[in-house]
Image (cartoon, rainbow, N blue to C red):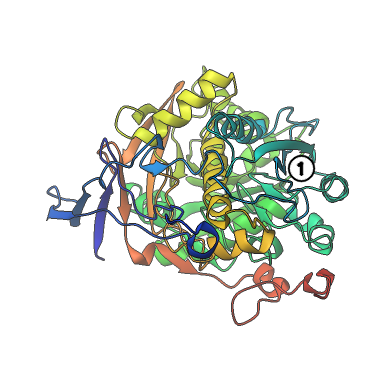
Amino acid sequence: MRRSRLRFTAAFLALGLLAAACGEDREDEAAVTDTTAESTDTTAAPEGDGGESTETTAAPEADGETFGELPWPCGPAEDGAGLGDSDVGVTAETIKIATGDDAGFATSPGLNEQITDAVEAMAAKCNALGGINGRMIEVQYYDAAILNVANAMTQACEDGNFMLVGQGWSLDSAQEETRLSCGLASVPTYSVSAAFAHAPLMAQPLPNPADRLPTSIAAHMAQLFPEEVTAAATMFGNYSATIESTDKVKEAYPDYGFEFVADLEYNISGEDDWTPFALQLRDAGARFLYFSGSCIPNFQAFMQTAAVNGLELITQTDANFYEEKCAEANTDGAMDNLHIRMAFIPFEERDVVKAVDDYLTILEESGGKVSMLGMQATSAFLLWATAADACGAELTRDCVIEQIKTVTEWTGGGLHAPGNPAENLPPSCGMVLKLEGTEYSRVYPEEPGTFDCDDSFVVEVQTQWVDQAQLDENRVSQTFASAIPAS
């Protein structure tokens, strides 16, 4: 297997840099383009790494203020721009966008509120720089509380928003018929369901398609724990988001030597007693656990119960477990040996990667909460804003989506490994973090600011969810396509 180290230096990699084209006639010449770094220095990998170390020097410094290496796509209107009411939610002075989270979910109050904090902070920063071509951004917030996403989407449509930007709703399939019927295009923080992950009128900065799975962590876990992965188990909440994620893991991981001995479904609202789950895994001989859900309270409660019952597990979760409250809760060490799949540079490396420092600085100044999902929302906002800026005076939903669909590499200015919004493909680079006590540490690769990269780390999967999404030849879901009004 050929691997490479993708490194973000202090003035880090500018893969996928999006910028509005310059020129006197902005409306005719504006475009979203990919800009790669000027030069690449490839040297031998450290001994034992099994591949190459790729270090990419920074692109020339951009004029004006930047977010990482990405020029801010915000500023006043050019003289004679001729701004007007170009689409729903767009006037000569303002752009109304919708965002939201599941903060009202009673079992986990404040769920994913950090993504809204990020969108609001980024919009405020953009407005301070002059808005999008002089138009000020107005952010409308909608709380789906997981189970109320259809109502949230209905309200977002009725309120006349231009687009959805940076929202993250767990049951996003329940929104689709309403969203498409009102033509509300979206650049979300993340997708969950296959229907939304492949939806029309949608593009993601870091795609999570149903028919592909990034598997770098599977390779890393098999390398680090070759015996444990032969006795693996899964635990997942009893709702579609966690079931879909787990189904993809169960299909793809066996190629890396994983053998699953148990699959347990738990109540997403929590269990009165986690002991039966711990005993079932112990009796099955499980030594490795993939857990899909949230860190607090369910994962913590289960791991504390496992410890009481003498069950020792190497555990793996997804990136939503990289959050302050998860680490702070691990004072008893019950969640030690938790390994997290990451495609983002961690906060602990803000002195290595400027984009991470920029994100943290903006959130610190705004008083918002920080999280990895907040960085993902930041990348979504920047992708949307860059495309909107490129559209110039004639800002429309179709133009924004068309601009994004030309972007084959996007890093959010260096926040994360390169994703491919145009082709809806996830990153082939990854890294592993570990929770020990109340701190996260980098496990693999060890060098700060780096990812392990290989084209083979993106695996095609064919689950029941992919079938249900009714993908066409372009991998676009037709499940709710009939809801789109005829033009």
Q: Is residue 328 visible?
A: no
In the depicted structure, whether residue 60 falls above or below residue 422: above
Side of 28 relative to 187 (left or right) = left
Please state the horizontal and vertical placement of residue 115, each as a whole percent of the image.
62, 36
Q: Nearer the viewer, residue 318 or 40?
A: 40
- Quadrant containing the N terminus is bottom left
Please state the horizontal and vertical placement of residue 337, each as a whole percent of the image.
43, 34
Please state the horizontal and vertical placement of residue 114, each as a whole percent of the image.
62, 31
Q: Quadrant of residue 245?
A: bottom right
Secondary structure at numbered mark 1: loop
Residue on which the image places disc 1: 267
What is the residue that sits farthest to the bottom in this orientation? 473
Q: Nearer the viewer, residue 79 or 198?
A: 79
**Which residue is drawn at the image coordinates 68% and 44% (left, top)?**
167
Please name the amino acid that badge 1 sits on. Answer: Asn
**Which residue is drawn at the image coordinates 64% and 41% (left, top)?**
135
**Which residue is drawn at the image coordinates 66% and 34% (left, top)?**
116
In the depicted structure, whether residue 143 falls above or below residue 370: below
Side of 460 relative to 172 (left or right) = left
In the depicted structure, whether residue 365 falls above or below residue 452: above
**Which residue is drawn at the image coordinates 25% and 40% (left, top)?**
9
Q: Residues within 10 Å of mark 1 (few under 14, many from 20)?
A: few
Q: Quadrant of residue 346?
A: top left
- Quadrant containing the C terminus is bottom right
Q: Is residue 142 visible?
A: yes
Q: Nearer the viewer, residue 264 or 144?
A: 144
Please state the horizontal and vertical placement of residue 159, each as a whole percent of the image.
85, 45
In the depicted structure, whether residue 461 falls above or below residue 130: below
Side of 93 relative to 145 (left or right) = left
